């Protein structure tokens, strides 16, 4: 990490960044494409020293070097464990061995998970904290706020009262390495809808708790520190977690085998644009499903277009619908287009998925193409266009 990047993550002389910026990671959690990612950790220097989380095993050497630079010969009194997922907790055991007098602090569920992830018995060094418990370090006071299922059951966030810092665990996190210096919101929406998006109600509960805090900094476990944009960040997450679509427009993900479904979709997209609609299309055979999940959450209207395959939905579309179902997708107006040369079945199967989701309005007509779009299909497409308009 460059000195400029480290300064960007710095909160104060007493709260120092010791995390790891992973610029080489291409797939996060073995499924999400990303151009790197940061694993954020902080040291709070006071009469007693607290470390906020550790980092992924990929960053172990850099992490311990950063700790050494921040601590010198000083020894930490506490390790605050906000989240037990291995990308943040991988170095708990090594850190505990390095500092045998250091106490481990976390929610009650953290205590259970420590014994599952590590071989060492650290239970005698672990202290469970509850909602609004505090820990004084000297001039700094940590207040612990439980955030279960944002997005694991053991999660808590920590508010440092004197410098008004919310250490927010995976909440407000992003994909992308800090070095990339990308616009925050693009990486944040891709991360949120795929990692945390299922748990909108739990995020809403955390936002309600956070609304009572005077926050000067938000320091998530992934991505940049927020200082001057906190109101915008909180409003954005409030909208995302309430399953409101932030963008007006029609997103059309399509799954085409030989190109005929694709041609029909692109022609239809042009017709919608000529009617004044904002239209975004995506070829599910060429893009990662996580990108399509994000777009489905971002736009207020969706048209799913798929070929039939083995009397089922063509797998790329089936994969998208499966992901949307498990991510608690809801509150959208949707249309359906199917293609089938001899026995079209995709629409029926797509409807079954969509009817199992909350507050999904399936508009009529459902369009069936037999092999290629023909002039006799035009009236149906026009009717679907009118039904999908605002």
Image (spheres, rainbow, N blue to C red):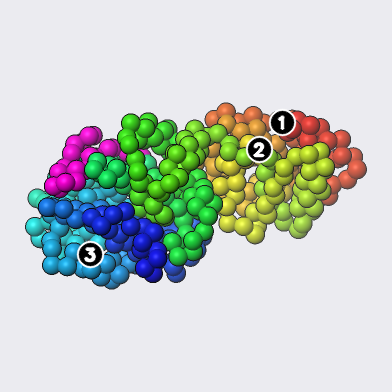
For marks 2 and 3, give the one nearer the viewer: 3
Magenta part of the chain = 130-149
- Among numbered discs 2 and 3, the one appearing first in the sequence: 3
Q: Secondary structure at mark 2?
A: strand
Dot 2, how many residues are within 10 Å of its Cα: few (below 14), some (14-19), or many (20+)? some
Measured as percent of width and height from the top left, residue 245 is found at 58, 36
Q: Is residue 213 left or right of residue 360?
A: left
Q: Secondary structure at mark 1?
A: loop
- Among numbered discs 3 and 1, the one appearing first in the sequence: 3
Q: Is residue 1 left or right of residue 124?
A: right
Measured as percent of width and height from the top left, residue 259 is found at 77, 57
User: Which residue is depicted at the point 78% across and 35% down?
Assistant: 385
Q: Secondary structure at mark 3?
A: helix
**Residue 141 counted in the magenta span:** yes
Q: Residue at label 1?
A: 390
Q: Residue at label 2?
A: 248
For marks 3 and 1, give the one nearer the viewer: 3
Q: Nearer the viewer, residue 252 or 98?
A: 98
State the mark number for residue 70: 3
Measured as percent of width and height from the top left, residue 274 is found at 82, 42
Kindly indicate whether the residue at mark 1 contacts the one at mark 2 (C-beta within 8 angstroms). yes
**Residue 358 counted in the magenta span:** no
User: Which residue is depicted at the point 58% across and 42% down?
Assistant: 298
Q: Nearer the viewer, residue 45 or 91?
A: 45
Spatial separation of the CA atoms under disc 3 and disc 1: 55 Å
């Amino acid at each position: 990490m460059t000195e400029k990047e480290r300064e960007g993550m710095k909160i104060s002389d007493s709260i120092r960044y010791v995390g790891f910026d992973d610029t080489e990671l291409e797939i996060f959690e073995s499924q999400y494409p990303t151009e790197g990612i940061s694993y954020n950790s902080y040291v709070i220097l006071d009469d007693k020293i607290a470390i906020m989380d550790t980092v992924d095993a990929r960053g172990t050497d850099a992490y311990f070097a950063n700790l050494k630079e921040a601590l010198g010969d000083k020894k930490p009194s506490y390790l605050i464990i906000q989240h037990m997922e291995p990308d943040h907790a991988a170095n708990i055991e090594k850190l505990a061995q390095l500092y045998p007098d250091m106490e481990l602090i976390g929610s009650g569920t953290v205590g259970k998970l420590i014994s599952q992830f590590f071989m060492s018995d650290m239970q005698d060094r672990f202290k469970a904290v509850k909602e609004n418990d505090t820990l004084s370090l000297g001039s700094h006071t940590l207040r612990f706020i439980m955030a279960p299922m944002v997005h694991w059951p053991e999660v808590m966030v920590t508010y440092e009262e004197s410098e008004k810092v919310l250490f927010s665990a995976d909440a407000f996190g992003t994909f992308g390495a800090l070095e990339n210096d990308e616009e925050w919101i693009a990486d944040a929406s891709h991360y949120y809808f795929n990692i945390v998006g299922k748990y909108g109600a739990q995020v809403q509960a955390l936002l309600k708790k956070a609304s009572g805090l005077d926050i000067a900094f938000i320091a998530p476990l992934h991505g940049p520190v927020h200082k001057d944009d906190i109101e915008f960040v909180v409003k954005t997450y409030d909208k995302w977690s309430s399953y409101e679509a932030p963008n007006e427009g029609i997103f059309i993900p399509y799954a085409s085998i030989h190109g005929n479904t694709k041609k029909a979709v692109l022609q239809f997209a042009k017709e919608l644009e000529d009617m004044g609609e904002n239209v975004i299309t995506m070829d599910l055979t060429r893009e990662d499903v996580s990108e399509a999940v994000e777009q489905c959450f971002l736009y207020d209207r969706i048209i799913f277009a798929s070929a039939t395959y083995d009397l089922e939905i063509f797998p790329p579309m089936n994969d998208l619908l499966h992901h949307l179902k498990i991510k608690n997708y809801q509150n959208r107006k949707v249309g359906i287009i199917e293609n089938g040369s001899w026995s079209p079945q995709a629409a029926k199967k797509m409807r079954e998925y969509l009817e199992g989701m909350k507050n999904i309005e399936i508009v009529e007509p459902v369009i069936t193409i037999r092999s290629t779009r023909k002039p006799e299909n035009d009236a149906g497409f026009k009717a679907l266009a009118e039904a999908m308009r605002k």
